[in-house]
Amino acid sequence: MYQTFTVKEKVKQIFFLLFPILITQLGMYSMVFFNTIMSGRYGSSDLAGVAIGSSIWSPIFLGLSGILLAVSPISAQLFGEKNHKEITLTVKNGIYIGLVIGLLVIVSGFFLLDPILHLMNLPERVQEVAFQYLTGLSLGIIPLFVFNVLRSFIYALGKTRVVMVILILALPVSLLFNFVLVFGYFGFPELGGAGGGYATSVTYWVILAVTAIIIKKQDPFSSYDIFKNFIDFSFSKCKEILKIGVPMGLSSFFETSMFAVVTLLISRYNVTTIAAYQSALNIVSFLYNIPIAISLAQTVLVGFEAGAKRYQDAKTYSWLGIFLAMMFALVSGILVVFFRYEVAGLYSTEEAVISLTAHFLIFALFFQVADSIQVTAQAALRGYKDVNISFIATLIAYWLICLPAGYGLANYTSLAARGYWLGLTFGLLAAGVFLSMRLIFIQRKFRELSTIVD
């Protein structure tokens, strides 16, 4: 990561950072994909159990890992300030927080998981697989959270390709252990769908080990002495991470849980509508990986420039990220709409499902554009370490606009299930507009601050 002077150089640096982040995102997604594919081949009950387990774990993971990702904007600003000692302190205390969060999740799961699954009134085999899958997954929670801290540190230094390589090398490990633990090959126990949880945990430990070795041995990471004199607890540093990270984590949790509620509300429709909605949402979620990758790169770059007090460069990166994400969402959305029947055909062979999925994808175009604006505007604000107002804005948008608007349009107009797509779009657009306005305010505030300093 380096100082840039032209828009062309800035665009080049954004793409230099975001491409490895995108591959990393897809690599993490692939682990869940392997679990789903292997368990599906083993049996439908195992597939359902893994799906239930994943639906319980995903919002928890995204919410809690969001807290740890605060290490990224904090470290990026410190990197811009060339304050290496504070970066080391931030990462060490981020690891402490990750360990504590991981232990709390494991203890909570020990007492709450079984009662939660009983409340869902699942078939006995599905409940058993879900419980065993999450039990296996719990063995990898601590390395996963610690890895997220180390990943944030690596991103803050602009070395995103390192994480990409680690994830690519880990994918064969994930695939191999899924294969042998689900089906019981080469002397391993045959665990069925639950084997996917254990396989993922093994992979997380491998990923953490490789990442730790690289940080300890390879420049520029080794110069920070992350694993040296590890008893370096700082209450103020933990407070800073939590002050920024908790709103970030809650934003991720409320967004994920909002989609879970919409899925639940959609479930009252017929099977065709449910299948079509899930197919369309899966397509949109896959394409959403690129705006997410842009947003992660954007947070680092804005933080880096803000830390170096190059506020005009930070402003340029902020709006470049929003523009690039919006253009990608628009172009990809238009392509999906043009080829909507062909895309829908990848998910089903039933004519009714294909037709309705294709219809939903038209609404998904506007949804994608609105979502790309809000996620990158929020990412830019995180680069400035402005998270509290953003959290409140997104909470209002998700739960007081998206859900009520969607429910009203679906139940009190002729739109039916299509109303939920429009409701989501209205809420996300409102979030995007407000966050953009907040971004303008923060940038003006930083510009006035720099004028006073000068």
Image: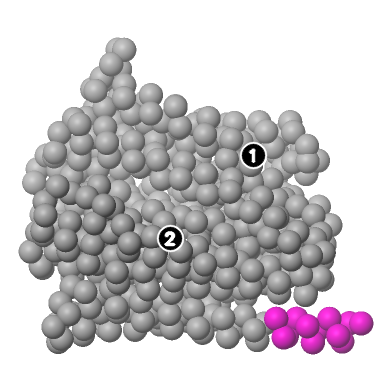
Real-space CA distance between mark 1 and mark 2, rounded to the nearest whole angstrom: 28 Å
Estimate the x, y position of residue 249 in percent, counting from the top left. 48, 64
Q: Residues within 10 Å of mark 2 (few under 14, many from 20)?
A: some
Q: Is residue 333 magenta?
A: no
Give the residue at mark 1. 162
Quarter of the image for residue 193 reads top left
Left or right of 10 on screen, residue 67? left
Left or right of 369 on screen, residue 354? left
Q: Residues within 10 Å of mark 1 (few under 14, many from 20)?
A: some
In the depicted view, which residue is nearer to us: 336 or 228? 336
Quarter of the image for residue 60 reads bottom left
Estimate the x, y position of residue 352 in percent, counting from the top left. 10, 58
- SS at circle 2: helix
Q: Main secondary structure of the magenta part?
A: helix
Question: Which amino acid type is marked by label 2?
Answer: Ser
Question: Which amino acid type is marked by label 1?
Answer: Val
Residue 97, numbered label: none
In the depicted view, which residue is nearer to us: 120 or 30? 30
Quarter occupied by the C terminus: bottom right
- SS at circle 1: helix
Left or right of 381 on screen, residue 289? left
Q: Extreme right residue here? A: 454
In the depicted view, which residue is nearer to us: 290 or 381? 290
Give the residue at mark 2. 332
Which comes sooner in the sequence, label 1 or label 2?
1
From which residue to which does the magenta span run?
A: 443-454
- Residue 380 shows up from this direction: yes
Q: Is residue 448 magenta?
A: yes
- At 50% from the left and 83% from the top, the residue drawn is 433
- At 29% from the left and 78% from the top, the residue drawn is 422
In the depicted view, which residue is nearer to us: 154 or 288? 288
- At 30% from the left and 79% from the top, the residue drawn is 423
